Amino acid sequence: MQKKYKGILINCKIYKENDLFIKFLSETDEILSGIVYGGLSRKKKLIYQVGYYLEFNVSYKLNKPLSINAELIKPFISPIIDNKYKLNCLISIAALINLAIVEGQKIKNIYNITDKFLLKMFNNKKWFKNYCIFLFELLKMIGYEVNFTQNKNNIYFD
């Protein structure tokens, strides 16, 4: 059985000699992981980079890990290749999502807010303010919201 997903690649590790183990954030707001057989070949090596938007074909088999094939889709990250700050931001977002969400866990709208921020970052020169807002939204979504209005009396909030 096969399903198609669109998503952002958030983690990529070498699994065997020529295979990759990848995790991606799908449009269905969950993290899926599986194996890309032949992922280190010349043609496929350039596709499986952290932060790329990909269309995934996922094959389900009984008692075996997911088998994944992917193709690049828009938006491409080519506008930020020369900017080391934006690349570090993209990698930090992928790492935070990878650490914060357990595989198979669904968090509503996490893909949407990530996608909106990344599009703003790719297209705007003044993006750092949006990055800080995105981080607060991400913390709020995973359960670490800080209510500043109710904590006025505490000495740490001013």
Image: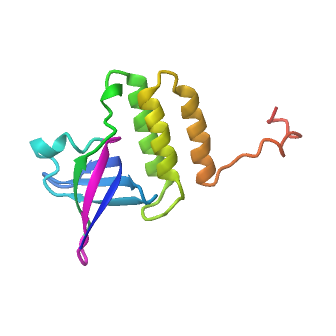
What's the image's color scheme? rainbow
Q: Which quadrant is the C terminus positioned in?
A: top right
Q: In the figure, is residue 124 to the left or right of 152?
A: left
Q: Which quadrant is the N terminus positioned in?
A: bottom left
Q: In the figure, is residue 3 to the left or right of 135?
A: left
* Count of numbered circles in the view: 0
Residue 62 on image: x %, y % = 24, 78
Residue located 19% across and 39% down the image: 46
Q: Is residue 61 magenta?
A: yes
Residue 29 on image: x %, y % = 46, 58
Residue located 49% across and 41% down the image: 116
Query: Could you say which is closer to the camera, residue 84 or residue 54?
Result: 54
Residue 87 on image: x %, y % = 38, 30
Residue located 84% across and 46% down the image: 150
Query: Could you say which is closer to the camera, residue 22 or residue 13?
Result: 22
Residue 108 on image: x %, y % = 54, 58
Residue located 29% across and 48% down the image: 54
Which quarter of the picture shows residue 78?
top left
Q: Does the magenta stretch include residue 110?
A: no
- The residue furthest left is 42
- The residue furthest bottom is 62
- The residue furthest right is 153
Per the rendered image, the range of residues in magenta is 50-64
